[in-house]
Image: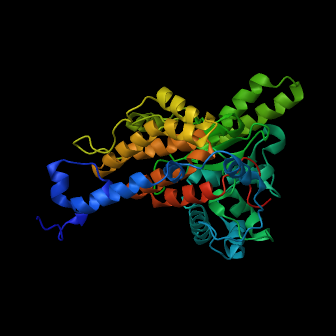
Amino acid sequence: MEDDSDKTPCKYGAECFRKNKEHLANFSHPPKAKRKSEEGKQESKTKKTKLEHFFKPSGSSAVEAENSSSEKEETSTSKTPGDEPKDDSKSDNTTEDVEEDGDTMETVDVKDDIKNKFKVEMPQDFYDLWEFCKDINPGKPSDALLDTLGLQLVGPYDVLSGAFRKHKGATPCYVLHWRYYYDPPEFQTVVRGDAEVQHHLGYYRDDPKELPAFVGSNQAKNGCNIYQQGDNLFAAVKLHIDKLTKSVKDKKKLETIKDLGTSLMTFAKKKDYCLDLKSKSMLARNKKVVTKTFHGAGIVVPIDENDVGYRELPETDAGLKKMLKKIVDSKRDDERMAHFDPLQEIITFVQFANDECDYGEGLELGLDLFANGSPIFHTATRNLLTVAYSLLGRDEFGEIIEAHLDDRRKDNVSQLS
């Protein structure tokens, strides 16, 4: 009998289906007798147990899970990523003394504070838009665009405004602050718009350690789609202004909007920001996108010289959507389990892909299940994405998705309300 003691244990153990010689030479597996025993035990498990391993059952439990996002008390003191208590008075007070040109020590402190709270770094246009809004409304920069454009600065901007320092309730979960229902970890909301459709703008980045690839727009009430709006906030706000000028009929209001637009463009050009819908950097990034995913923003993963890093799902987007709809629409758990089998087969393929360093497949499937929105897939989403982000070295995104799935809200997305 071959000695496997010096081999790395295969993470799938007795459930491993791989038979290629290279894998068997590098990884150890339970003896056949033990494997058969484990297989027997697995077969003896009830179908309901298998079902619940991957998604929440139907009935009251699933309904409660979906409704809990709106009903959870915001006074909860449970510790989640981003809950680390901090002395906001220092970082927020320093923002009052930030100089417009160059990085003063105070500016660096504020940037670090935001990064510590939200797990990602904000680009320079984030701070420049704040300066622009301070010129319009020195007393309340967050609301400088509200009356004219219907836009309000939120999320990480609440560090600059001092809103966190003034908050008297439980310590907020920063990574969930203004995180809408369909916002994946790659998306960080910084501007809110029409509350009726939950329109919001945010930075989309492929890696938490990198600066944003573009500014995206989503209307959470209408689904998961993320639309590119330029590579900086000035471009995104200008595009918003362009849309308003085509729809507003009141001449006086239209004139006010155009005046603000002129001021914005003058400021942006002085700072040398591109105001195009798609900049050169965005076009370059789009060439690296391996798949669009359900939300449309696409994903980028490292691909080596041997084309290793991503493989396509064995199902089209249309086919996967039909598959998920059958699962969600099932009336009974046994019916749902039957519809779930094809998805379980895809999840098994993802396990093989991870073994062979094609980490993008699991990332794609996890984001697609998240974009579907049904709490039924939250368990599978958590398993797929935490593994994918870990393998890709994007652990900050893994922390964010875990916190979001624990408290995924359709309303009351501010942690300060």
**Along the viewing direction, whichever of 220 and 150 lies nearer the viewer:** 220
- 62 left or right of 357? right
Where in the figure is residue 271, as x and y percent of width and height? 59, 46
Quadrant location of the N terminus in the rendered image: bottom left
Q: Residue 398, relative to residue 164: is it above or below? A: above
Q: Quadrant of residue 243?
A: top right
For this view, does 321 lie left or right of residue 39?
Answer: right
Query: What is the residue that sits farthest to the left in this orientation?
Result: 1
Image location of residue 199, percent across then percent down = 71, 39
Q: Does the rendering let one see residue 155?
A: yes
Q: Quadrant of the C terminus?
A: bottom right
Residue at image point 73% right, 60% down: 415
Residue 408, how many percent across, how many down?
66, 52
Viewer-side residue, 339 vs 177:
339
Above/below status of 233 relative to 390: above
- Residue nearest the viewer, comparing 341 with 122: 341
**Residue at horizontal 60 percent and vertical 54 percent from the top:** 405
- Labels in figure, total: 0
- Name the residue nearer the viewer: 47 or 292: 47
Colour theme: rainbow
Tell me: residue 167, above or below residue 252: below
Q: In this orientation, does residue 300 appear?
A: no
Residue 299, compared with residue 164, is above or below; it is: above
In the drawing, does residue 226 fall left or right of residue 152?
A: left
At x 59% / y 70%, what residue is drawn? 109
